Image (spheres, rainbow, N blue to C red):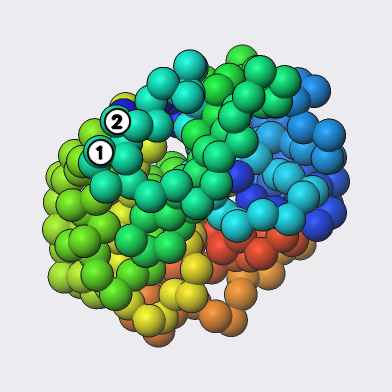
Amino acid sequence: MLGRFLEVSVHAPDALESLEFYQKLGFSPAEVGETWSHPYGVVTDGRLFIGLHQYEFPSPSLTFVKPDLYRHLEPLEALGVEFAFRKLGDNVFNEAGFRDPSGVMVTLLEARTFSPPARDPAEVSVCGYFSEFGVPTTDPQACKEFWEKLGFVAVEEFEDPFRRIALTSDFLDLGFYETRELRRPVLTFVDADMPARIAKIMRLGLEPSPRLPPSFDAQTSALFVAPEGTPLLLLTGDA
């Protein structure tokens, strides 16, 4: 229903500073086009793509590509989607957006805005394996039902360290976390030996945030925050 996942779009007040941060963590830059007039960069670990926009908008946004976009808005509305904005016309780059029950913005574009670099998806960054886009919410069940209508498939439900519902698709996995310990969506990474990865990141000169939720063990987990404010949650676990 949504098309192909493109990127996690984030507002980066200093796109160059954010780009350098992710490259230090082992992400690769992608070649961007001239779609946007504002400074724009994209980094990837082979599985996750992060769009760094030096432009203010509801951030983060899950961005998908849907060719012939204008033809697909009505079927989405029939599923209960209420669009927050539409920019459609012959002389504009077509895009539209809506929010899910948790408040996360979902943006649909008519075409790609960058070319992926030649990188093996198995070549993970220093952070480990990107497991999911994690969203704190008071109603994970409502989020689950909403995203299932859009083609995502619920795969697991957990209760520890808090209730979590995981959904999957061809290009993006989502996790809805019923907790007040996280204030915004996180990029979640896992690795069987995450303490070693955390130590390596610290040797790169990056310090973990003291705001790691108390539900997580500080000996095996860490929270790093990118310059634009994106939280990276690193957990010990299997990919």
Q: Nearer the viewer, residue 172 or 59?
A: 59
Split into 4 quadrants, where in the image is the C terminus? top left
User: Which residue was labeled with disc 2?
Assistant: 75
Relative to 194, is 52 on the left or the right?
A: right
Q: Nearer the viewer, residue 36 or 158?
A: 36
Split into 4 quadrants, where in the image is the N terminus? top left
Is residue 114 placed above or below 101 in the rendered structure? Answer: above
From the top left corner, tell me how far across and down residue 50 is, in percent: 61, 41
**Residue under the image location 37 percent in, 64 percent down:** 102
User: Which residue was labeled with disc 1?
Assistant: 78
**Residue under the image location 29 percent in, 30 percent down:** 75
Type of amino acid at the residue the image marks with label 1: Ala
Q: Nearer the viewer, residue 23 or 111?
A: 111
Decide: marks 2, 1 in contact (CB < 8 A)? yes
Within the image, what quadrant is residue 181 found in? bottom left
Q: Nearer the viewer, residue 117 or 91?
A: 91
